[in-house]
Image (cartoon, helix red, strand yellow):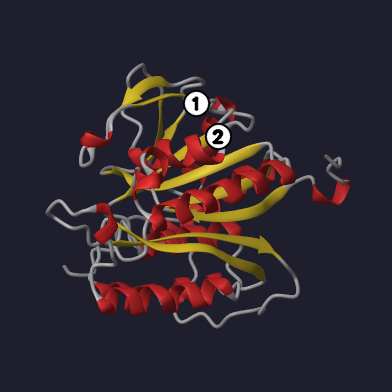
Amino acid sequence: MDAVTEEQQTGVVLGVLVPGIPHPLLCPEQNAGWTRLRQAFDAVRDRIRELQPDLLVVYSTMWTSIIGHQIQADPEPTWVHVDELFHDLGSIPYTFRIDAPFAHALKASMEARGLAARTVAYEGFPIDTGSVVALKLLNPDNAVPAVIVSSNMYSDRAETLVVGKACRDAIDAGKRRAVVVVVGTLSNRLFTDWIDPEDDHVHSAKDDEWNRKILEFLGQGRLEDTAQLSREIQRQVRIPKVVSFKPMWWWSAVMGQHNRYKGEVLAYEALFGTGSAVVTLTPDESGVGEKEFDEDDVERFRGDRNVIA
């Protein structure tokens, strides 16, 4: 493997979107689409190895926090996880390698921008399914230390942007070479009854249409444009903001709020009714370029604005 050059040493070198539902990890052979998702995970794993990052930053929509923002800081969390919805698929034993010093640095960066943040580090802390799936498949040998960040279910666009910028602050200040991973689906309507795996499909034609619109933008490297469209996407596909459109705000903020990326959609498949994709974004100055902000940019969180009152 070639050595990392001086010019490549620091910053965000790759952005990744992956689903967190456990089927590509536990039973990919049961459905051809799940197999393709698993193959896409494997391709991203190989890409990460080629890039030789020294940090994975995982933002999981499946780890929801209520008050402020939580950061996993246990250096070696070890447990056996069972998904609360798909427990029939079996257990997922794990041991992860967490970059505890970076977790504490990230907490400080969040607080410096006005956010409420805390680290968590105790035996048996329930790491969410999405983080478990992402780290087991993208970093199976724990070659790269990771940190996991929660998604606050009540944070608005302004607060979410500031969280992303705080993550970038910590990456830059630590001169880290980071891959950022967003764990979440596109449309998020799960089937509520058991289905034969061979019959899996995106829940509705409308969901599928909007999923493909999102992927068209991401495939063109237009991350900030996707973030700017997030409110309309949410209205159309009627999904909880913590699950789908909020991660686009965080993803764009941590990567730089522009459209200068090379986008690649490695897979798009139904996953128990949801629209699930594996996408990579690589910084690329020849990308689409700048964007037009439709909403104010935000540098520091100053608390809820109480606009209803």
Residue 123 visible somewhere in the drawing: yes
Q: Which residue lies under the disc numbered 2? A: 146
Question: The residue tagged with tag 2: helix, strand or loop?
Answer: strand
Residue positioned 53% across, 38% down in the render: 106
Q: Nearer the viewer, residue 144 or 139?
A: 139
Q: Amino acid at mark 1?
A: Phe
Residue shown at 65%/45% (left/top)? 46
Point out the image quarter for the N terminus.
top right
- Image coords of residue 125 (percent x, y): 33, 24
Residue 96 shows which numbered tag?
Answer: 1
Between 5 and 21, the one nearer to me in the picture: 21
Is any atom of residue 107 visible in this view? no
Q: Neighbour class for label 1 at 10 Å: few (<14), some, many (≥20)?
A: many
Is 286 left, or right, of 274 in this rendering? right
* Circle count: 2
Q: Are marks 2 and 1 in contact (CB under 8 Å)?
A: yes
Report the amino acid beneath label 2. Answer: Ala
Residue lying at 44% horizontally and 48% vertically, measured from the top left: 114
The residue at the point 25 percent across, 65 percent down is 239
Residue 238 sits in quarter:
bottom left
